[in-house]
Amino acid sequence: MQAPGELIHALQQGDEKAYATLVKTYGQMVYSTAFGFFNNRTDAEDLTQEVFLEAFHSINKFRGDSSVSTWLYRITVNKSINQLKKNKKREQLSGSLIPGGERTMWGHAKSPDAISENLERRHILHTAMDTLPELQKTAFILHKYDGLPYKEIAQVMNTSLSSVESLIHRAKINLQKKLIHYYTT
Amino acid sequence: MNCHFVHTHLLFYLDQEISPGEKEGLETHLGQCSSCKSLMEKIKPVYEQAGEPVSPSDGFFERLSSLPPGEKYPVRHSLHFISFVRRIAAVILFMLASTSLTLLYTSGQKQPTQYAGEEPFFERYFHELDEELADNDYYFLTATH
């Protein structure tokens, strides 16, 4: 396995094998993060492709100030947040066109169409996560889905360690409220 | 320890982020309070979904890594192609449908009625024209004499 520095150097030289190595080494990491944001395989795969495309095109801008994984996490988080904003706008537009099309927060969770219990549970969790503020959600995903230590989350989010602690703490309090509300009403 | 404590520390308990004393108190309360116990039983598997490993479709990373660097969206390209084919098919179907409708309409239309004993229009027209010309010949003939 190539060292990250060598890998970056090879990528900057346009080495095709290095690109394949980058995908093989960091693909699962990028996919897990994207899945945390989208809770949807198709969107997560699409975003993973976009992340590697972006990484390839901007490889010459990578100066090695951070690790390759931190750099890729940053691209993934930024792209995911932007895509979610676009999706939200699209949903609002289509929702406004459907008369009486207002959806409840848990609209799909109690649907009998749920394929399995686990899918339904995941949907409940993600519906609650979707109500979190952007930064809380990002910190929570990086912590729970990727298992990143707070220090690395701080690097990815370009913030302090105490901010990350606070964001994750508040994310859990908010999630807790939403889940309790869902199961007690 | 009461229900309020459980409601405010539930996820922290699941993440083992409470003190041993708090944990013991919370577990004692869960043993006595059926509604808190039931809540915990429902929320625990939901919250645990966050740590569950997720995987893409079969062969996704192989497909992605085998692409030439910078190659754009193989999935979307194929989707664009399918969309293009669908559009072409829709246009062809529309043309076929409109042509057949036009043919049906024209074949169903009534032909001009021709009554028994009546000369068809053009034949009558030429017949009248012949008669007119014959009259004129007669006029010229009579005029020259």
Image (cartoon, coloured by chain):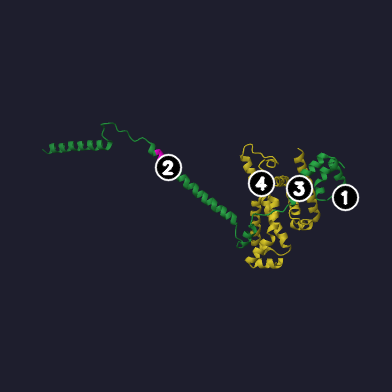
Q: Check contact, mark 2 vs mark 3: CB within 8 A.
A: no
Q: Secondary structure at mark 1?
A: helix
Would you place residue A95 above or below residue A53 in this image? above
- Nearest the eye: B120 or B144: B120
Figure colour of chain A: yellow
Q: Residue at x 25, y 37 (%)?
A: B123
Q: Residue at x 79, y 58 (%)?
A: A151
Q: Earlier in the sequence, mark 2 or mark 1?
A: 1
Q: CA distance from mark 1 to mark 3?
A: 21 Å
Specify the amino acid type for callout 4: Lys
Q: Which residue is mark 4?
A: A88
- Nearest the eye: A96 or A49: A49
Q: Are marks 4 and 1 on the same chain?
A: no
Q: Chain of mark 3?
A: B
Tell which tag, 4 or 1, sits nearer the viewer.
1
Q: CA distance from mark 3 to mark 4?
A: 24 Å
Chain letter for the part of the structure drawn in green? B
Q: Which residue is mark 3?
A: B47
What's drawn in magenta, residue-wise? Answer: B100-105
Q: Which residue is mark 2?
A: B100
Specify the amino acid type for callout 3: Tyr
Q: Chain of mark 2?
A: B
Q: Which residue is mark 1?
A: B20
